[in-house]
Image (cartoon, coloured by chain):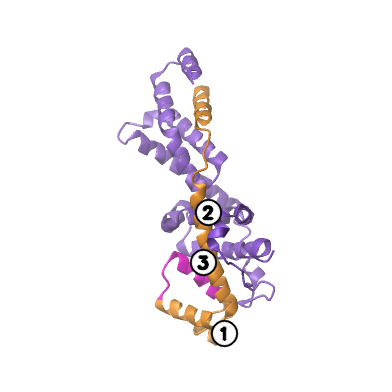
Amino acid sequence: MKIWVIFGTDMNNTPVNDLVKSWVKQYSGELYSWAFYKTSDKELSEDMVQDTFVAAFKGFKEFKGESEVKTWLYGILKNKIADHYRKEQRRSTVKLDTTSDYFVNGHWKESEAPKEWAVTDEKHLLDDLKFKSVLDGCINKLPGNWSAIIRLKFIDDKESKIVCQELEITPTNYWQIIHRAKLQLRKCLELNWFAA
Amino acid sequence: MKKPTHYIWYSCQRATELIEKKHITELSAIESVKLKLHLGICGACTKYSRQSELIEKLAKEIAARQVEVATDLLFLQERIISKIEEQ
């Protein structure tokens, strides 16, 4: 760790540089945890935290010390996460109507009607790594914005209003997406786990 | 096209929509009664409802456990710092 200190002082010994570096030491851990909590994606979280500090370094003049450093950094990161979800959402607005895959005239298609699942022990399921990977796989198979929404929902259920704000969608749109995503998720789990 | 029965009877598509809506927000009194009526006689949607709830529970639990995926913090810090020095 000492190496960069020596290099740092050699190359550009500006106070801003040192200050931002000390923030990296102090805050990168918790910023990372928060980004991971929001995205469940290690690499993406690392990149976002890095971008946050780069943005803080570049935009240092805007930081007038009115808010706490930590609050300021969280604000930057929060915007980056919101941008990410909006991009994901835009990328896949094409494939929307799949309800017709499941229903004819409002009734379940014979092949799609839910079958009985044999679930004996829920707690045991949660410890089963194979089940976990099937569930992760099924979530990943959802179209981009759906899996983002489903992840946000499951990670932080109480924030559905905030999820809508972050993604710029209406509450109606939100639960309709959840409905379609859930139909697909349910089917995927039935095929790959409960009926297997 | 909406049939006259629409006013008292939900289609399965609508019923499953409301099952999901219920996880997120409160249903109106009418929605709630009509959904109960539907679930009272529709086996497929009753299964859907149970399974939907199970998926919610399992996925939330698993998401909560995933929170602690650690990064190599020192490595990340060095990466960020060298990035700042490139600026």
Q: Nearer the viewer, residue B54 or B20?
A: B54
Does residue A142 appear in the picture of this structure?
no
Q: Residue at x 45, y 29 (%)?
A: A58
Coordinates of residue A125 in the picture (x, y in percent): 57, 59
The magenta stretch spans which residues? Answer: B13-28
Q: Nearer the viewer, residue A115 or A50?
A: A115
Earlier sequence position, callout 3 versus callout 2: 3
Side (left or right) of A40 relative to A108: left
Identify the residue under disc 3: B53
Identify the residue under disc 2: B62
- In the rendered image, the quadrant that contains the C terminus of chain A is bottom right
Q: Residue at x 67, y 61 (%)?
A: A192
Query: Please, what is the three-letter code of the amino acid marked with disc 1?
Result: Lys
Residue farthest along the top direction in this orientation: A10
Query: Please, what is the three-letter code of the amino acid marked with disc 2?
Result: Ile
Q: Are marks 1 and 2 on the same chain?
A: yes
Chain coloured orange here:
B
Side (left or right) of B84 relative to A116: left
Q: Nearer the viewer, residue B74 or B33?
A: B74
**Which chain letter matches label 3?**
B
**Which chain letter matches label 1?**
B
Q: CA distance from mark 3 to mark 2?
A: 14 Å
Identify the residue under disc 1: B3
Q: CA distance from mark 3 to mark 1?
A: 30 Å
Earlier sequence position, callout 3 versus callout 1: 1
Q: What predominant SS class does the magenta segment belong to?
A: helix
Does residue A186 appear in the picture of this structure?
yes
Element marked by disc 1: loop
